[in-house]
Each structure stands twice: as C-alpha cells, then as structure tokens.
Amino acid sequence: MRVEQIPAASFFSLLSEEGLRIRLGPFNVRISTNLRHLAEQLHFLYAHYELVEDEITEFHVKIVSKRSIPRPFSASVHFLVDDQEPFPPAPVNQALAILEWGINLAIALRTNHLLLFHSAAVERNGNVLLLPAWPGSGKTTLCTVLAHRGFRLFSDEFGLMDTECDELLPVPRLMSLKNQSIDVIKRYLPEAAMGQAIPHTQKGTVAHVRPPQESIEQSAKTAKARWIIFPKWVADSPLRLERLPQSEAFLLLASNSFNYEILGEAAYKAVTRLVKTCHCYKLVYSDFDRVLTALNELTDGG
C-alpha cells in the first residue's frame, strides 16, 4: 500500500498513534507526530511512498509540539530520533523542514555499512551520475531538473555506495530547495509537485519537491557509477564541462564523504576504484537547457 491510498483522516490517526512506517530506499523509517498541518503536508509529499509492516525499522523519528513556560502562547516543535533530540526546537511552521533535516542527519550519522558521499545522484541508461558538491553549489536544483527530465533520482543529498560490490543504492527522498531556487524551479518545472514555502529557517526559505513516482517505485534498483561531475552554478556563466584528473577527483570525492575516515581502508579502496572506472569532470553552468543537452550527450555516449 502507498500513502496516497490512505484517506486523509486515517492518515492523521496513523501518524499520531502507532506511527507511519514507510520505505525510503534501503531504509525503513517510522514517523510519528500529533501535528495535523504536518500530516497534511506529508500526505501530499509522501503520496507515492510504500508502507512497510513486518520489517525492521532503522529509524524511529518524532515531531512533537511543546509550549514553554516563559512563552506559553508560542509553541515550538522538537525533532526526536530514538527519543534523542539532536536539534534545538524550531517554530511550529518549520515542522516539515526539521523532520527532513532530522532524517538526513540520522542517515548520515548512523549508516556506516555503506560509504556515504555528500552528493546528488541520478541514473540514466543504467549508469549513475554522481554530483558531489559543497553547499551553495546548486546540486539540489540541478538534481531536481534532471529528475524531471529523463534521469532517475537516486538522491539529492546522498551517494550511498556498497563498498563490497561498488553498487549505488537509491534513497529518493524529498528534494529541499532553498531561497531563489524555489521560484527558479517553479518557472522551469511547473509540473513539479512542490510543497509550501517555509520561511525564516536556519537555511532561509525552503520548499520540498516530491520525487517523480517512477523514481520511488524503482528505489530497489541499484546501479554502478559511470560519471562523477562536480557542479557549480554561476550566474550568466557559459557552460564549461572539463575533464578532471583522477588524483583531483579522488581528493574532492573523499572530502565529500560523511564517513570516509570511519570506514578507513575500505573507503580508500572504494574511492580509488570509483575514480578509475568513472569519467570525472568539473561543470560550471547557468542555463538548464544547455546543461541538459550536455549531460544527455555525455550519458548517451557511455
């Protein structure tokens, strides 16, 4: 059963009582909340995700609302993972943003059986294109465009690599756009299913885009990487797609890993294999049509 098959009233009861157990790629997550407006947002944005029943749940997360004694008329929301609170409380209207950041944090800190890159990842023609980048590089915006223009979404945040077989695992979660990117995507992708804009967060205004249904339905289908591209959006810049030496690609990729040092030798060998078997590039762009043409040609060429 998928979330969209649950009536809205029953969905809120599920979230506020036993919790919503859904599959997010290789992870099962149980989400609980008593906030009706958050339930409404999740019912729309999580519509295509599959419910799970008799399976192990890796993460148990909650969003709860509390009122403080000094400010009894101003409620705040708290994110809990396995009853631990890693974030300070936030205003009630930021509940969805806190939930999504919290799940990302749980994956980043508690997943050490896989090598985790801070990278968007999409698939085309049976091969994965990794897009590692520092915050502010526009990787989520580019990933959102690619996911709606012929590429299958793996993730806008994580490259999950099994170091034993070098397969990348999809975890197609909501794509979190920030500030100017929100209106950019609304104009370029009017068909994208986007949630409400959430202002005044620690990252500015954010809005979440629902992954295409096909990407969610194929989230058990792994693939190996063939291209590694380090993207950077620069206003009014001409498109530049330039080859990157393997040595530089190795350093950039290793430094964009959440758990490279924890995995040690296994991570070193995996990154070495990855840069040797992939075509590595730096990308500077400002125009979506041009970058789509360039990436389509690249991924068609093998």
Image (cartoon, helix red, strand yellow):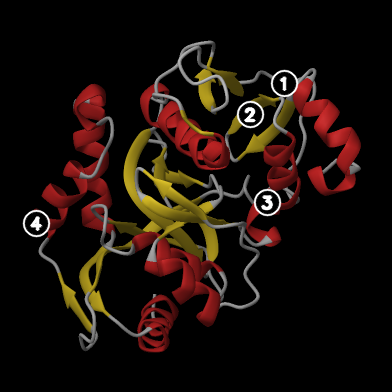
Quarter of the image for residue 111 reads: top left
Q: Residue at x 44, y 64 (%)?
A: 143
Which corner quadrant holds the C terminus?
bottom left
| Labels 4 and 2 touching (C-beta < 8 A) | no
Q: Which residue is mark 3?
A: 45
The CA span between labels 4 and 1 is 42 Å
Instruction: Count the labels in the image.
Output: 4
| Labels 2 and 1 touching (C-beta < 8 A) | yes
Q: Earlier in the sequence, mark 2 or mark 1?
A: 2
Closest to the camera, between mark 3 and mark 4, is: 3
The label shown at residue 248 is 4
Q: Earlier in the sequence, mark 3 or mark 4?
A: 3
Label 4 amino acid? Answer: Glu
Q: Earlier in the sequence, mark 4 or mark 1?
A: 1
The CA span between labels 3 and 4 is 38 Å
Looking at this view, is 3 or 42 the one in front? 42
The CA span between labels 4 and 2 is 36 Å
Q: Which residue is mark 1?
A: 55
Disc 4, SS: helix
Q: Residue at x 26, y 25 (%)?
A: 263
Closest to the camera, between mark 4 and mark 2, is: 2
Q: Which residue is mark 2?
A: 28
The CA span between labels 2 and 1 is 8 Å
Q: Earlier in the sequence, mark 3 or mark 2?
A: 2
Closest to the camera, between mark 3 and mark 1, is: 3
Q: Is residue 104 left or right of residue 130?
A: right
Q: Earlier in the sequence, mark 3 or mark 1?
A: 3
Q: Earlier in the sequence, mark 4 or mark 2?
A: 2
Looking at this view, is 215 or 6 the one in front? 6
Tell me if mark 2 has few (under 14), some (14-19) or many (20+) residues whose alpha carbon lies within 10 angstroms of its own.
many
